[in-house]
Amino acid sequence: MEKKEPLATREEHEKAITHYEDIPAVELVPGNVQAHILSGERATAMFATFKPNAIGPMHKHEHEQIMIIADGEAELVFGGKRYPVKKGDVTVFASNQEHGTYASDKGLKTIEIFIPVRQEYMDKLAALKKSLGK
């Protein structure tokens, strides 16, 4: 058997690994969409939960966005059409491409990557952490 690298210490692990559910959830669409958000130097990752029948309103932003459907079903709206999606589907929204979401009655969970960093989301997270005393 090949020798493995040494196991990280507890301190090293805590510094390098984050369990996304331990990050406070930011409300993106009040009462309908919450997200756990984190960023590196150049990209933001978001783990979003849409309540059943929630609507992510039409919007656009400078960021390129990759959306992975982690669970549930929805219709994504872009280019004037609705696109049904389910667990395992992936799409890419170009910079400034208008898009929105209609979650199904099952709700929706997504993993989304934004490039560059979504600073306004990081600012919301910082404000939430401050209000929670973290």
Image (cartoon, rainbow, N blue to C red):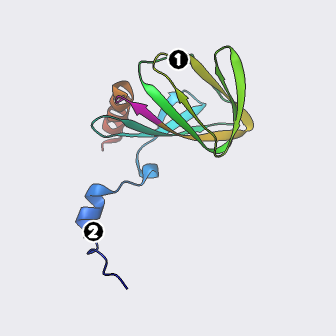
Q: Residues within 10 Å of mark 1 (few under 14, many from 20)?
A: some
Q: Relative to 6, is 29 on the left or the right? A: right
Left or right for 3, reference 98: left
Q: Which numbered circle lies on residue 10?
A: 2
Q: Which amino acid does label 1 sit on?
A: Gln
Give the residue at x 27% y 37%.
41
Q: Nearer the viewer, mark 2 or mark 1?
A: 1
The mark found on residue 11 in the picture is none
> Which residue is the site of mark 1?
97
| Element type where label 1 sits in the image | loop
Q: Where is residue 129 in the image (x, y as percent from the top left)?
A: 34, 39
Residue plotted at (48% across, 29% down): 65
Residue 133 lies in quadrant: top left
Query: Can you tell which quarter of the image residue 29 is in?
Result: top right
Q: Could you say where residue 81 lies in the image, as x and y percent from the top left?
A: 71, 18
Say which element carries label 2.
helix
Q: Which amino acid does label 2 sit on?
A: Arg
The residue at the point 25 percent across, 70 percent down is 9
* Prevalent SS, magenta region: strand
Q: Is residue 56 visible?
A: no
Q: In this view, does 28 lie to the left or right of 6?
A: right
Image quadrant where one finds the C terminus: top left
Q: Is residue 134 above or below residue 92?
A: below
Location of the N terminus (image quadrant):
bottom left
First to last magenta residue range: 113-117
Eyeballing the image, is 111 above or below 114?
A: below
Q: Where is residue 101 in the image (x, y as percent from the top left)?
A: 64, 26
Dot 2: within a 10 Å radius of its alpha carbon, few (fewer than 14), some, or many (20 or more) residues? Answer: few
Can residue 23 be seen? yes
Instruction: Return the residue found at the far front.
Output: 2
